[in-house]
Image (cartoon, rainbow, N blue to C red):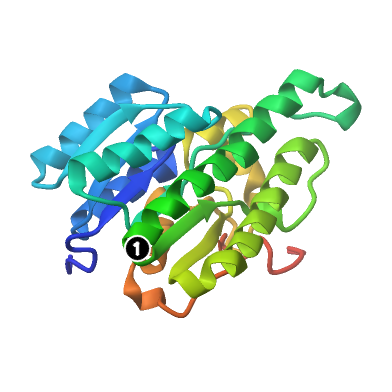
Amino acid sequence: MTQILQDKVALITGASSGIGEASAIALAKAGAAVVIGARRQELGEALAQRIRDEGGRAVFLKSDVIDPAQVQALVDLAESEFGGLDIALNNAGTDGPGGPITDIDDSAYSLVFDTNVKGVWNGLRAQIPALRKRGGGSIINISSALGRRGVAGLSTYVASKHAVEGLTKSVAIEVAKEHIRVNAIAPGPIRTPMLESASGGNPDGFNGIVAMGRRGTTSEISPTVLYLASDQSSYVTGQSIAVDGGATAGFVTG
C-alpha cells in the first residue's frame, strides 16, 4: 500500500475490535503511527503488538471516552510518543438497549449519550488544540446510517447518532480556517460484535433496509477512513459520507 500517511500520527478510540480495529491497521499500513484507545486492555494491547510485529508504530492506552481526562491522556500520549497528532478517529460507541422509548430508563439513555455524543465531544475538545499545533489535520467521527433516519425501538441510539452528525458539521465550520477538517462516516449494518449484540444474534435482520441486501465489512469502511485522513480529501469538511450499501438511498421494495 502506498504510504499516503507517512510521518503522520493518528489516534483511534474504541479500537479494540470492529471498525476501530480495522481502521487502526489500515492507518498503520498507510504509514501513520497510531495511538490505540479502548476499554478492553487485552485486546487493545494485542492490536498494538500486531501492528508493531508487522513493522508499524503503535501504542495502546486503556481509556474510556466518557472521561475527558482519559481522552486527553490519549492526545498527550500521541504527543509524547510520536511528537504530535495529525489524525483523530472518534470511533468509540455503544448501542444500548432497544425497545419503545417508554421502556428505556435514564441510566440506559445516559450510557448511550455519554459514550456516543459526549465521547465525541470530549474527543473534539482534546484533539483540536493538538491539531492546531501541527498547523491542521483531520478529525473523523463515526456516525451511522441511523443518524439519518428513524428506527422504531432504537430511538436512543438513533438520536445519539443524529447528534454526532450535528456536532461534526458545526465544529467543522468553527475550525475550517485553521486547516482542520472534521467529517463523519455513516456506516450501514457492518459485520462487527456490536451488530451481533444489537440484532440479538441475528445480524442479517438488518439486511432488509440495505439496497445491496447484505451487511458490510470493516474492510469496506477503512478505505473511507484513509481517504478522509489523507490529503486526498483536502477540500472536504463538514461532510458525512454514507458507506451503507444504499441503506439511506430510499426504500427497498423488492
Q: Residue 78's x, y, as percent? A: 28, 43
Q: Residue 59's x, y, as percent? A: 22, 35
Q: Secondary structure at mark 1?
A: helix
Q: Is residue 68 left or right of residue 59?
A: right
Q: Is residue 45 left or right of residue 214?
A: left
- Is residue 160 visible from the viewing direction of this image? yes
Quarter of the figure with the C terminus:
bottom right
Q: Residue 163's x, y, as percent? A: 70, 49
Q: Which residue is mark 1?
A: 226
Q: Is residue 170 above or below residue 63?
A: below
Q: Is residue 98 above or below residue 252?
A: above
Q: What residue is drawn where x is 35% and y is 77%?
A: 232
Nearest the camera: 99 or 32? 32
Q: Residue 28's x, y, as percent? A: 22, 51
Nearest the camera: 188 or 91? 91
Q: Is residue 78 left or right of residue 149?
A: left
Q: What residue is drawn where x is 22% and y is 69%?
A: 4
Q: What residue is drawn where x is 74% and y is 29%?
A: 98
Among the 4 quarters of the image, the one containing residue 37:
top left
Residue farthest to the bottom, as pictured: 235
Using a 10 Å C-alpha cutoff, classify the residue at mark 1 as few (fewer than 14 neighbours), some (14 to 19) or many (20 or more).
some
- How many marks the image carries: the answer is 1
Callout 1, which amino acid? Answer: Leu
Residue farthest to the right, as pictured: 102
Q: Is residue 195 left or right of residue 230?
A: right
Q: What residue is drawn where x is 73% and y is 23%?
A: 108
Quarter of the figure with the N terminus:
bottom left
Among the 4 quarters of the image, the one containing residue 66:
top right
- Is residue 97 visible from the viewing direction of this image? no
